[in-house]
Every structure is written in C-alpha cells, then in structure tokens.
Image (cartoon, rainbow, N blue to C red):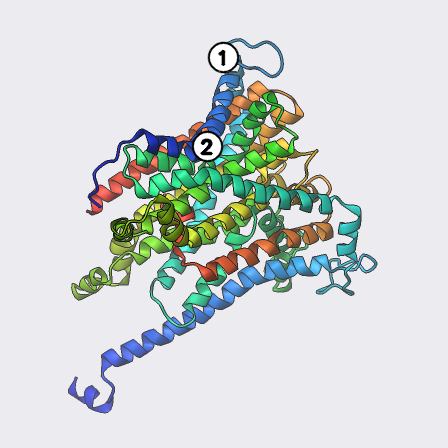
Amino acid sequence: MDRKKDVSIIHYLMILPGVGFIVLFLGSSIFITVAQSFGLFSVTGVSRFTLLNWKTFWERETIDSVLFSLKMGVLSSMGTLLFAFPIGLFLRKGGAGKRFLASLIKIPLFIPALVAAFLILNIISYHGILNEALLGLRLIQEPLRMLNDKFGWGVVAIQIWKNLPFVLLIVSASLASIRDDIIDAARNLGANNWAILFRIYIPLAMPGILVSMILMFIKAFGDFPITSVAGPTYPPSIALRMRNTATLFQEWDKAAVMGVIIIVTTLIMTWLYSRLAEAVEGGTS
Amino acid sequence: MTSSLLTTPTPPHVLEARRKRWIYGILTVFFGITQILWVGIPVLMAVLWSLVDPQHPWSFPQLFPEKLSWAQWTYVFKYTNIVRALKTSYSVAPLAVLLSFILSLPTAYVLGRKNIPGKKVFMLVVLLPIIMPGMVVALFLSRVFAAFHLTQSFFGLVLAHTLMGIPYMIRVLTTSFEAIPQDIIDAAENLGANTFVKIKDIFLPMVRPGLLAGMVFAFTTSIEEFNLTFVIGTPTFETIPTILYSFLGYNFIRTNASVVALIMMTPNIILLFIVERILKADYLSASLGKV
C-alpha cells in the first residue's frame, strides 16, 4: 500500500453525502446541547448567556445520577470482560464443536437491547426462575431482590448478557492474532500456564481489551432504556434523569447541562483509551 | 526412570497430549451446555409467557403454565397498536436503508479506494453515531428537528434512522471496496473498459456481498432503534421497540411484552443468521469492532 496521496476536490465532494450527513445531524445536536446548557437557543424563557444552569451540576441528585452511571459503566464493562476473556482464550484454538459454540454465543448480539432486558428480567424477577432455583436448593431463605434493586445488579446482568458477544468478538480477534510461536518459545524457556496468561495473553490482547472496555463503558454509562426498565427507583441513570428533566419537567437548559456531562465523559473516555492504546503499543513493540 | 518407561509403553508426551484432548473435550461440552442454558432459558421463558392462557394464570408455585393457548397473541394483535407499529417499523426501515445506501456509496468508494489526506479522521467521524450516547443525541436533535417541523413526522423518523444506519453501511462498503484488487481494475482499463463498464462488471459484482451485509445491518438497526424514535416519533409514530418499552414501563404486562419481544427479535435473528451464512465473518467485525 504505497500509493501516493490523491488530492482531488472531487474526492472530497464524494465524501460529503455520507460524512456530511453525520456531521450535520450530530454536529447540530451537540451544538444545541452545549448552547442550551449556557442558556442560548432556550426553549422556554429568554435566550441569553448564563452560567446559572450549571448550578445543577452540584445538586445532590445530579451527582448521585452521575456516580450511579459511572458505577454501571465500570461494573458492566468489567463484568463482561470477566466472562468474555476465558471464553475467548478457549475459542482461540480451533476444535470440534467450536464453530457451533461460537455461533451460539453470538445470538444475544442479534437480540435488541430492550428485548434482552425483558428476557433477563423474566429470569431475575422476584419469583423468577433464578430465585426459585436458589430457594429450591435452599441456598437462600427468601427471594433476592435483583430487579430494580438499589445497587443496580439487574442492569449489570442485562448489560453483560446483551454485550458479551460484542466484547467477545473484539477480544477473540486480538487473542487470535497472537502467534503460537511466542507461546511455544515461552514454554520452552520454562514458563508455566500462569506466566503465559499474565505475560503473554493479557499484555498482547490489551489493545482489544481496552477497545471493548471503553465501548462497553460508553454504552452502559449513557444507557437509557435498560436502566429505565431494570434500574433502581433512585438514583436514575444520568441519561434517564436528563430525559425526565427535559420532557417531564420542561427544564431543557438543565437537561442540556446533563447532556454535556454525558458527552464530555464519553470524550474523556475515548481520549483516555487512545492514550492507553498508544502506551500499550509502545510498550509491547 | 527406565523402569517406569518399561512398565508404561506409551511415552509421557503422548499421555500428556491425550490428557489435554480430554480436558478440551470436557471444556467444549461444558461451555456448550452453559451457552445453551445462557441463551435458551431466557428465550424459552419468553415463549412460555407468551403462550400462558389468560384463564389459567401462571403464578408462583407452578413450574409450568397449566394451560397453553394463543390467546395472548390474538389479544395483542386485536387490542394494541402493534399492527400500526409493525407497519411503521417495516416502512421506515427500508426507506432508511435506501437513503443510507445512496448517501454512503460515494463516500465508501472514496474511503475504500483513494488515499486522501484526513482519511483516518473521516473514518472516526463515521463511527460517531454509534459511539455517541443515544439519548443525548436524540433529545437535542429533536430540538433541531422541531425548528424544521420534522418532529412527529414520518420523514423525520426516516432521517433519524438513516443517521443510525449510515455508519454500518459506510464501514462495510468501505471494507468491500478496499478488498477489490487494483490489478483487476488496471487490467480492465488496459483492455479498454470505460467507467460504465468498470462499474457494471467490476465494482458492482465485487461489492455485492458487502452491500447485502450493510443493508441487513442498517435494516436491523432501524428495527431496533429506540432512543431517537422515542423522542422524535412518539406518540404520533409508535414502532415495535417503543411499544415494548411501554409494556415494560408504566403498564407492565409480562404476557403482552413477551409477545411483542418475540415479534421483534425473531425476524432479526433469522435475517442475521442468513447473512452470516452467506458472508464471511469479516463483515461483522468490520462493522462492530476494529475501531
């Protein structure tokens, strides 16, 4: 791929329909979010520059929502990785039944998020099959509250179930790219299984792990429908709180502040990821 | 050492390999069974719930519903908005797919075949609709749409769904354009093919699998799309996800929700499995992973 750079106005014009559409719609949406958070283009009341809306940032409810969403983001991404990494390691080596297993695992990827929420909700509800099974095995005295629980385990369970194949896809790809020679060489030099796991598999798969973790975090952090269905009554996720503030209480300017919080967190995570990925690549090569 | 070798005719490394194969076999079976339960039980529960007879409710101590019937299905089709929602969903989706295809084709061609400055930035921008948190985009895009009278309108819904479909379409088409070997194009040019012939005989046939994949991804994305539809479309336009959301939220009816959930997921799973059969796995990772 040593083609020289083609610089032509026609090529940029051809890029315009697709990229331009995205820039126009996303750009205008983000612009309005930021502008409204400072009181401009206000839906209700007078439009003038003000920092007053940002007071909402220090309100107890907002902080609770942000912390809750952060918790959901971290737990969902960590939890999914915990399931995905061992399966990815196992699937690395081809073998009988692996293809079938791989396509079986992929099914939740094709199931819409809301449907996934409903499917898992049936399992973990108060008299759901999981509680009944645990009661039957006499592991617990009374059913556990896993749905709409204060902590948010129900949300984490749904996120893990729905996004496992997605994370697995990325993690498997980076595990598959590790060459067997390296592992054979390490074994010859006397490395045991733990050393191979911690000094070869995990460091070499790190770029894939990071990408999937960041994408998972962003999804779970900004999630609206799943926390709305399975999350606790208080605190709501930040996206849920933003939507309620805007459409139920008609406080669009306050909602815009929350929108900016979500966008900025997403951007920080993306930036952090690119820095980490650079550091990892610099370290291994 | 020598005595043990004499008593065991199979050398240790063969035993080791055999032991390993055993462990792998047991693990495969273990993972297989867990996966079948992991996916199977939730789906089975939804199917059972959708078949519960309203006269014989399925409640706590019973392991299985007493009587199964189609009553819930007929109820949902008769007395809820599902038929209208199905019509909306399945008329928005093809239009959004068509529009995102038309908009993506030139962009994907340039991104896949030309080495222009700033290509990396464009590829990143293309991913943004998937990465950006849906509710923020939906909520404030609705302000922009309101200014142009596009909220609560069918055309606005199509535009919103197009926005979510374009990333998949561009990514997948770009991958297919990249995969065309330059030699073929050069050879065709040498033999005197003009632009029209090149498009008809080289580009179109070679990107067809990618085009199919992109269309299915954009289509299923549109069928599943919730945030934008919820803010921009409801209550004038209900789609299957917004109906399901209302059944899961303020009026939670488990049996109705199971019917709607099954209506929503079955076509998606079938479509994607057909496509996966036809295509190589690359497209899946091209559209989802490798950011």
Q: Position of residue B266 (x, y in %)?
A: 61, 56
Q: Where is residue A195, by image quadrant?
A: bottom left
On the same chain, marks 1 and 2? The answer is yes
Indicate the quadrant containing the C terminus of chain B: top left, top right, bottom left or bottom right.
top left
Three-letter amino acid code at the position of disc 1? Leu
At 42% from the left edge and 33% from the top edge, which residue is drawn? A19
At 74% from the left edge and 63% from the top edge, which residue is drawn? B65
Indicate the quadrant containing the N terminus of chain B: top left, top right, bottom left or bottom right.
bottom left
- The residue labelled by disc 1 is A51
Label 1: element kind: loop
For residue A110, side relative to residue B26 (left or right): right
Three-letter amino acid code at the position of disc 2? Ile
For residue B213, side relative to residue B268 (left or right): left
At 21% from the left edge and 65% from the top edge, which residue is drawn? A184
B77 vs A279: above or below:
below
Q: Where is residue A14, by image quadrant?
A: top left
Q: Which mark is residue A22?
A: 2
Of labels 1 and 2, earlier in sequence is 2
Separation of disc 1 and disc 2 at Cα? 29 Å
